[in-house]
C-alpha cells in the first residue's frame, strides 16, 4: 500500500495581506477605481502555487525574464515557507521528472474529496492580443523546451508538486487552505488557464490572489494594443483584478508574515 508522505506541521499565527482590486464604482461607466484593502487570515489557510517556472522556454525572451523572476521569487518563497505557508510547485508537463519524489506523492495521494460545481463567472476578452504566441524575441517554432522547474527555486521538505487542478484542489482541502497566492508565468496564459490556476480555482471557490510583481506575460509589442511588454503585463494584471481576484506585492506578502 502506498502512503501519503507527512504533511507540514500546522502553523500558528496570522498573515496580513495588503490586496489591490478594481471596482467599477458607477456601473456601466467603464471607469474602474483601484481599491486597496487589508485582510488578515490564518497562515494555516494560505498556500502559494508556483506556475510554470520552467528551466527553459521556447521563447528566448521568456526564458531570460523567467530567470530574473526566479531570482526575485526565491527569497519570497523561502520566507513564506519558514512561517509555515504551504508551497506547491506546478511546472506543467514535467511531472515525470518528479515522479519518485515525496513532494509529488504528497499531492497525488491527498485525501479524496468531491470537486464542487464550478461557479459561473464571465469576463470580456483580454486587453492584449497574444495570438502570435506572444514572443518578443523573434522565435517562432513552438516546442516543449522545458524538462523541470528552474533549479533557482528550492523544493522544501513539506512542499507539494502537481500540475493537475483536481489534485491541487484535494490537497488544499486536506490542509484546510482557503486562500491561494498564485505566482509565476505567464499571466495571460497559464496563470489564468491552467487547471490549478486562477480561473479554475476561483470557480471552485478557492480565494486566489495574484503576486503581481512575480509574474510576466507572453506579449509581443508588435501586436495590439501596441504598448511595451511591461505595459502589456500591467493591462493583464488589471484585467485579473477587475474580473477574477485581487493582487498583492511580494514585499507586502513578506512584511505581512507573522
Image (tube, rainbow, N blue to C red):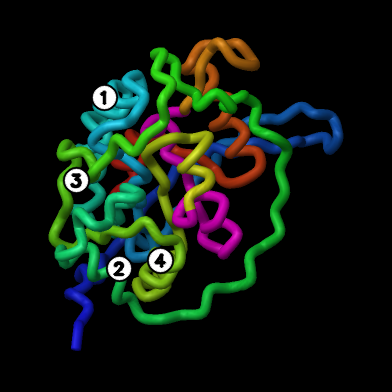
Residue appearing at x 31%, y 70% in the figure = 108
Q: CA distance from mark 1 to mark 3?
A: 17 Å
Q: To which residue does mark 2 refer?
A: 107
Mark number, residue 78? 3
The crowding category of the residue bearing disc 2, from other C-alpha atoms within 10 Å (few below 14, some 14 to 19, many at least 20), is many
Q: Marks 1 and 3: which is nearer the front? A: 1
Q: Going by the picture, which residue comes out furthest to the bottom?
A: 1
Q: Which residues are magenta?
A: 195-217
Residue 197 shows in the view: yes
Mark number, residue 91? none
For the residue pair 152 and 164, the one nearer the viewer reads as 164
Q: To which residue does mark 1 refer?
A: 68
Q: Residue 29 at x, y = what percent?
A: 84, 29
- Mark 3, secondary structure of its residue: helix
- Mark 4, secondary structure of its residue: loop
Residue appearing at x 76%, y 27% in the figure = 31
Q: Residue 165 at x, y = what percent?
A: 45, 61
Tell me which label, 1 or 4, sits earlier in the chain.
1
Q: CA distance from mark 3 to mark 4?
A: 19 Å
Tell me which label, 1 or 3, sits earlier in the chain.
1
Residue 255 shows in the view: no
Q: Is residue 54 shown left or right of residue 24?
A: left
Mark 1 near mark 3, Cβ–Cβ under 8 Å? no
Q: CA distance from mark 1 to mark 2?
A: 28 Å
Q: CA distance from mark 3 to mark 2?
A: 20 Å
Q: To which residue does mark 4 refer?
A: 177
Amino acid at each position: 500500500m502506498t502512503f501519503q508522505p507527512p504533511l507540514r506541521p500546522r502553523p500558528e499565527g496570522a498573515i496580513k495581506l495588503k490586496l489591490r482590486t478594481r471596482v467599477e464604482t458607477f456601473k456601466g461607466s467603464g471607469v474602474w477605481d483601484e481599491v486597496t484593502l487589508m485582510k488578515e487570515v490564518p497562515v494555516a489557510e494560505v498556500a502559494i502555487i508556483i506556475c510554470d517556472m520552467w528551466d527553459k522556454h521556447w521563447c528566448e525572451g521568456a526564458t531570460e525574464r523567467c530567470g530574473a523572476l526566479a531570482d526575485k521569487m526565491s527569497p519570497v518563497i523561502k520566507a513564506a515557507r519558514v512561517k509555515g505557508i504551504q508551497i506547491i510547485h506546478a511546472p506543467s508537463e514535467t511531472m515525470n521528472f518528479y515522479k519518485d519524489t515525496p513532494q509529488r506523492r504528497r499531492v497525488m495521494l491527498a485525501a479524496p474529496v468531491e470537486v464542487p460545481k464550478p461557479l459561473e463567472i464571465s469576463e470580456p476578452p483580454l486587453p492584449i492580443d497574444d495570438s502570435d504566441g506572444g514572443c518578443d524575441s523573434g522565435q517562432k517554432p513552438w516546442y516543449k523546451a522545458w524538462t523541470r522547474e528552474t533549479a533557482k527555486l528550492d523544493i522544501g521538505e513539506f512542499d507539494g508538486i502537481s500540475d493537475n487542478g483536481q489534485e491541487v484542489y484535494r490537497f488544499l482541502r486536506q490542509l484546510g487552505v482557503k486562500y491561494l497566492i498564485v505566482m509565476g508565468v505567464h499571466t495571460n496564459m497559464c496563470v489564468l488557464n491552467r487547471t490549478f490556476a486562477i480561473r479554475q480555482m476561483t470557480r471552485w471557490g478557492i480565494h486566489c490572489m495574484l503576486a503581481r510583481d512575480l509574474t510576466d506575460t507572453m506579449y509581443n509589442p508588435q501586436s495590439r494594443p501596441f504598448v511595451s511588454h511591461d505595459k502589456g503585463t500591467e493591462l493583464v494584471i488589471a484585467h485579473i483584478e477587475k474580473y477574477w481576484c485581487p493582487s498583492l506585492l511580494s514585499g507586502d506578502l513578506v512584511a505581512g508574515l507573522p
